[in-house]
Amino acid sequence: MRLELGHIYIKDIQFAAESKIEDGILYVSEEAAKAVALEDEKIKSVSFDIAKPGESVRITPVKDVIEPRVKVEGRGGIFPGVIAKVDTVGDGKTYALKGMAVVTAGKIVGFQEGIIDMTGPGADYTPFSQTLNLVMVCEPVDGIKPHDYEAAVRFAGFRVATYIGELARDLTPDETKVYETCTIKEGMEKYPDLPRVAYVQMLQSQGLLHDTYVYGVDAKKIVPTIMSPTEVMDGAIVSGNCVSACDKNPTYVHLNNPVVHDMFEQHGKTINFVAHIITNENVYLADKQRSSDWTAKLCKMLDLDGAIVSQEGFGNPDTDLIMNCKKIEAEGVKTVIITDEYAGRDGKSQSLADADPSADAVVTGGNANQVIILPKLDKVIGTLDYVTKIAGASEDTLREDGSLEVELQVLTGATNETGFNKLSAR
């Protein structure tokens, strides 16, 4: 597949009577954006706000972060199976609005949504302190069940992001990058001396609002399979989960997966980037065994020399991670795993819930239990009503001076396990 990804850089966001993009400025009609968000009757109301880097603003509780994109040539549309029809995507031409994001906020579950600080020490740990954020705070109708509300907010975010992305359809990108994949036979013939490497991406799929969607299908219903890595750039994988904010993959991360982009940078130079393998994370042992067996089988069938394996979440999924690593290595394929750590506030506890000698090449996104003090900021978009319940917080989180004593867990993207963060270890 060959995808041309056009970058349109957004320098500012302003509310206006008409939605448009001019001279790098995104003008948003609140009335039009609200109409798009409120297409679902499960959402009682929605309000929009803008948060810019460096402002004394805290956004919480954060559900998802989405980069607006539009498909201008090729098959299908952005977010296939969710917003667009179920067509295979990943080829043609797509435009992305860089430097900005649509952020969905509001109580969903209340204990695993996160915080984005636009300034201060918290901003140093979340990548989304650097984006211009169009924030939509959703309120549910009375009596709605949490999973129905989560779905309503998720789809509302995708609708608004698609609406914003469409504003760029007739623009000329500031920059265009080309991503092209070979067939397996073509790759072997073209790069006979380069190591054959694949990316194995583990998708959070443990249910109970811990879900990821592939072409609209809940990932817990899939068996491991092969994708073209350009498909994710068109939104083939989207977030629908409420795992801890620090290491969940918001939809923005799927669209901009740094493992995919970095492997493309090395494709044809130091490696032959063969395929993007997706697998799931399961609750029951039999499901873990099935998925890890299939993942290792695919690695062997592709005759790989190496695989990079990324995790999402922690605790129970550590078992899936180690099973994948152990079984892929047993097939003669060298692995590097990407994870984060829950090593206790003092950093002295066991970092992962599982381990194996085969996991001898590890990239870490940092210790999610690290404690940080977030000062009181001038403005909150959303509400602090649930700040003591977020994973990584406690009853003592909200201090008398308005500051927050929390673990990095509460910060969206702080220890992200694709490396879409600012933290690692030596």
Image (cartoon, rainbow, N blue to C red):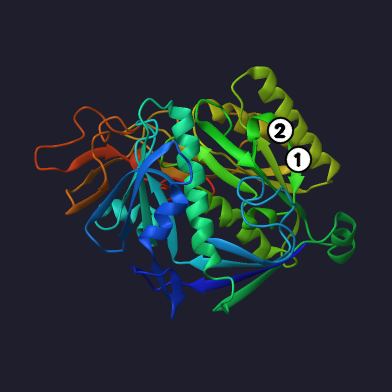
Classify mark 2: helix, strand or loop: loop
Of the 4 image quadrants, the one containing the N terminus is bottom right
Amino acid marked by disc 1 = Thr
State yes or no: discs 1 and 2 in contact (Cβ < 8 Å).
Answer: yes
Q: Is residue 217 above or below residue 253?
A: above
As drawn, the residue found furthest toward the left would be 400
Amino acid marked by disc 2 = Ile
Does any portion of residue 425 appear in the rendered image? no
Q: Residue at x 36, y 53 (%)?
A: 135
Mark 2 Cα shell of 10 Å, populated few (<14), some (14-19), many (≥20): some
Q: Residue at x 41, y 27 (%)?
A: 144
Classify mark 1: helix, strand or loop: strand
Q: Nearer the viewer, residue 164 or 198?
A: 164
* Residue marked by disc 1: 225
Q: Position of residue 335 (x, y in %)?
A: 67, 43
Q: Is residue 267 above or below residue 250?
A: below
Q: Position of residue 65 (x, y in %)?
A: 45, 51
Image disc number at residue 222 = 2
